Image (cartoon, coloured by chain):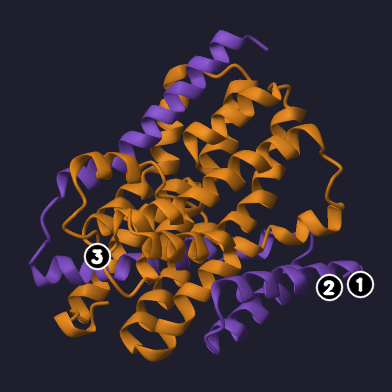
Chain colours: A orange, B purple
Amino acid sequence: MNTKEFKEGIRDGLPICLGYISVSMAFGLSAAKMGIPVWTAVLMSLTNLTSAGQFAGATLLATHGTYLELTISMLIINIRYFLMSLSVSQKVDKEFTTGRRLAASFGITDEVFAVSMQRRKELSFSYMTGLILTPVLGWTGGTLLGGVATSLLPEALSDAMGIALYGMFIAIIVPPAREHKNVMFAVLLAILASCAFTYLPVLNNVSGGWSVIIITVVVSAIAAFLFPVKEEEDD
Amino acid sequence: MNIPYLLIGIMIMAVVTYAIRVTPMVIFRKKIENERIKSFLYYIPYTVLAAMTFPAIFSSTQSSASSIAGCIVAVALAYFNKGLLVVALGAAGTAFLVGMLGL
């Protein structure tokens, strides 16, 4: 374990952890409202580490959905992690053995992915361990807090925290979009497509999980076709 | 609530989610050299995060006024290269203040 890399991981993971605490408190709260025992909600957070998937899964379980429905929902909502893991697989260093790949894969969430892509060097196992550690604690601990002490945060504050994770995403996409016209193009096209999938008839019947996949694949392909990236620009 | 049913459900969720995450990490062990595919992968973080953020950010708080204000502040802070935490808290703080004003 490389201590310096591990500490950098912890440092970069802390903002994710803070954002997760509020979101997972909301999850713990709604799971409790649905009649799901707190300890099972905490277990779900610890083993799943995914926001949208857990909200959908808890809702299905509370309404006695079938295991098939549960499996298909998880596939559709979480399939975007496939693309994220694929990107991460291209950025890990040579020391990333199979065992390390099996371990680090567990923690690839939207935010962990986003932050690891922003790092300007190859990803070491020490860095990834630090990066994943506090978000897991925040996510699991927040679920517990939300389940047992729902009135801990004033509602206005927990409501405002809902925007924090989106703020993080904005912090990741805006600076490179400002510097590189090709990235700006990809970002704007993705936003346009996402709005179309949200507001246009027919398209808005596509579930959120699938529309993100379709937009990611199609827009990235268009951008790669129009503006191939040379080796040097690839950070 | 039926506990065995819940626990099996949670296990299924965990297995499916982990399988999605682990498969590419184990399959794609070598660096991809093809320039088109590398370019495609280069754009993925930006397109996936942009698609997930917009327009969802505008319904992330109770009122559109607070989420729009939070979004504007986030974009402005990010434009001037402020770090993740500053941008995230700036967005949340703005949304909180606007929410307090009752807008």
Residue A48, position in %: x, y? 48, 35
Q: Mark 1 = which residue?
A: B101
Q: Amino acid at mark 3?
A: Leu
Report the front residue among A72 and A122: A122
Can the viewer see residue B48 in this picture? no
Is residue B96 toward the left or the right of residue A110 in the image?
right
**Tags 1 and 2 touching, CB below 8 Å:** yes
- Binning the other alpha carbons within 10 Å of mark 1 as few (below 14), some (14 to 19) or many (20 upward) gives few
Mark 2 residue crowding within 10 angstroms, few (<14) / some (14–19) / many (20+): some
Residue highlighted by disc 2: B98
Image position, residue B27 (x, y; %): 16, 44
Instruction: Say which element carries label 3.
Output: helix
Looking at the image, which is closer to me, A132 or B92? A132
Query: Which chain does the residue under circle 1 lie in?
Result: B
Mark 3 neighbour class, 10 Å CA radius: few under 14, some 14 to 19, many 20 or more: many
At a point 79% along the width and 63% down the height, the residue shown is: B63
Tell me the residue that label 3 is attached to. Answer: B41
Mark 3 to mark 2 CA distance (whole Å): 38 Å
Give the SS element for disc 1.
loop
Rounded to the nearest whole Å, what is the CA distance between mark 1 and mark 2? Answer: 5 Å
| Amino acid under disc 2 | Val
Relative side of A180 to A89, left or right: right
Q: Nearer the viewer, residue B9 or A103?
A: A103
Identify the disc placed on residue B48. Answer: none
Residue A168 visible (yes or no) = yes
Say which residue appears at 59% left-offset and 16% top-offset.
A64
**Badge 1 or badge 3: first in the primary sequence:** 3
Residue drawn 33% across and 40% down?
Answer: A103
Upstream in sequence: badge 3 or badge 2: 3
Q: Quadrant of residue A93?
A: bottom left
Output the chain of dot 2.
B
